[in-house]
Image: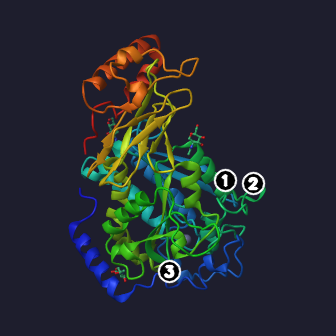
Amino acid sequence: MAISRPHSRLLLLLHAIFALTTQAAARGGHDRSGTDDRNLGSFYRNLLQDKPRITEEMVRGYMSNHELENAIHAFGSRCPNISRIYSIGKSVNNFPLWVIEISDKAGQKEAEPAFKFIGNVHGDEPVGREVLMLLANWLCDNYLKDPLATLIVENVHLHILPTMNPDGFALRWRGNANNIDLNRDFPDQFFSINNDINYRQPETKAIMNWVNQERFTASASLHGGALVANYPWDGTRDKSKQYYGCPDDKTFQYMASVYSQSHHNMSLSKEFEGGITNGAFWYPIYGGMQDWNYIHGGCFELTLEISDNKWPKAAELPVIWEHNRMSMLNLVASLVKSGIHGRIFAADTGQPIPGSVMIKGVDSKVNASMTFGDYHRIIAPGEKYEVIASMEGFRPKATRTVLLEGESVNLDFILDPNGPDGKMKLLRNHCGCRCGDDKLFHMQGPNLGLYLLVSFVLLILYLLFKRKSASRLLTYRYSPRRPIAV
Ligand SMILES: *[C@@H]1O[C@H](CO)[C@@H](O)[C@H](O)[C@H]1NC(C)=O
Ligand SMILES: *[C@@H]1O[C@H](CO)[C@@H](O)[C@H](O)[C@H]1NC(C)=O
Ligand SMILES: *[C@@H]1O[C@H](CO)[C@@H](O)[C@H](O)[C@H]1NC(C)=O
Ligand SMILES: [Zn+2]
């Protein structure tokens, strides 16, 4: 169940030594010039001269849009206990954007992280849509047989959108039916190019609404044309091509490495050290989906280039799937096996509250859910962190330093409401510690026990009054002091 295999680590190390002596050229994928529109100028969402050049021969063996639609519904009927099929909108040509949700409680809210995979963002990169169907079917076939499949089905809500761009696929070109590159169509943090909602493509709108509705912890979109795991930022303020890390750079490097090192040979790349790259370092783009997800959705998104050849022969698909299988599974499972998870409660009512969680020194926040107050903070292991929970109307609380090692940490917070004069009220005297003064939330020790006990009693009292919400509250998994069993 180790996320990275020891031998690939060793090979990675050997490669790093090799790279030192040979001065690796990291200028990007070999076929980037000319064919890839990152070079058509970052500001043009319209694709010029993008002539279809996909032959009938190449298309043979790939599912058509209608075949894919049938496969999605067939999956839904074959694995109804662990899935739900829904649509997030329609393409320009009215094709539904079908999503498969995989979970033992699909369609229900749970105190669990959610992950999304998006395939076929670019119409002429069809590998993702095929591989995602293989992933869904593999999970269905191996649930309760394979520990990783079981872990994912039981502890994650996995949403799979096999094609974000069915029209582009049918037209056999990169953009959508309006010939707009969907991975340049999102609002950008530096430039206002895409801010006019009237020009936004329906596929882009569908993704944005989806991200605003679901609370995704992390995600990945699948592309072709290179072999690398790409992470934010994708663009730079001055448009220069240089390494430009986001506040969670280390965490993104960790996530990208989980993918590349679990892959057949991504981590052995000669172009990208360790098989991962910062987007702007490779080549800057603007209006990309990845950066928007991180900024506006609090969703840690990777852009995965999973085959050197954008449109390989269909006969190669099973091998590509095999090469990516452990990467995909380990990336999704890393949401459960690592990071800091927990719930935030109000001390006075015992109710969960949708506060947010910050890591000291990292300028980003992860929000807890409205229903359960659960949060899921992916973070690179092997370091010490101070976690701060906050919520408007409550006093923020920080942990002592938490050492995050090879597994996830469970950390619940009970926040004290501000009194009318801005001071803490109620539980202060019961607390037994001077937690109001140093704002420390002691993870261990008798104080926490007492504190939790008092809150628990309040919680029970609350539940007796509100039986309606009791059933919801009892379904959560990350109960205090019960670390996730992996
Ligand atoms: C779905 O769950 C029900 C009840 O647990 C069970 O009887 C049924 O066999 C399951 N179906 C499948 C396809 O797993
Ligand atoms: C990875 O393996 C594939 C298939 O075996 C091969 O075509 C490709 O060149 C390899 N890439 C690297 C970076 O080793
Ligand atoms: C998190 O919550 C804050 C405060 O309610 C809100 O301003 C912010 O937009 C939320 N972030 C995300 C990613 O939803
Ligand atoms: Zn692409």
Image location of residue 111, percent across then percent down: 41, 36
Q: What amino acid is at disc 2?
A: Ile
Task: Identify which residue is drawn at 37% across, 23% down.
Answer: 434
Residue 434, visible in the rendered structure: yes
Taking depth in this image into account, of 409 and 29 the one nearest to the observer is 409
Residue 131 placement, left or right of 239: left
| Looking at the image, residue 230 lies above or below residue 208 | below
| Residue depicted at 25% across the width and 41% down the height | 485
Which of pointers 3 and 2 indicates the residue nearer the eye?
Answer: 3
Q: Are marks 2 and 1 in contact (CB under 8 Å)?
A: yes
Estimate the spatial distance between the alpha carbons at disc 3 and disc 2, rounded to whole Å: 32 Å
Q: Secondary structure at mark 3?
A: loop
Q: What residue did someone put label 3 on? A: 28
Q: Earlier in the sequence, mark 3 or mark 2?
A: 3
Gap in angstroms between the C-alphas marked 2 and 1: 9 Å
Residue visible at 58% across and 81% down? 54
Where's ligand 2: which quadrant?
A: bottom left
If you read the primary sequence from the N terminus, does the residue marked by circle 2 or circle 1 appear first? Answer: 2
Can you identify the residue that label 2 sits on? 197
Amino acid under disc 1: Lys
Q: Residue at x 48, y 16 (%)?
A: 425
**Which numbered dot is residue 205?**
1
Looking at the image, which is closer to me, 258 or 129? 258
Mark 2 crowdedness (10 Å alpha carbons): few <14, some 14-19, many ≥20: few
Note whether 459 is above or below 181 in the view shown: above
Amino acid of disc 3:
Gly
- Badge 1: few (under 14), some or many (20 or more) residues near its Cα, within 10 Å? some
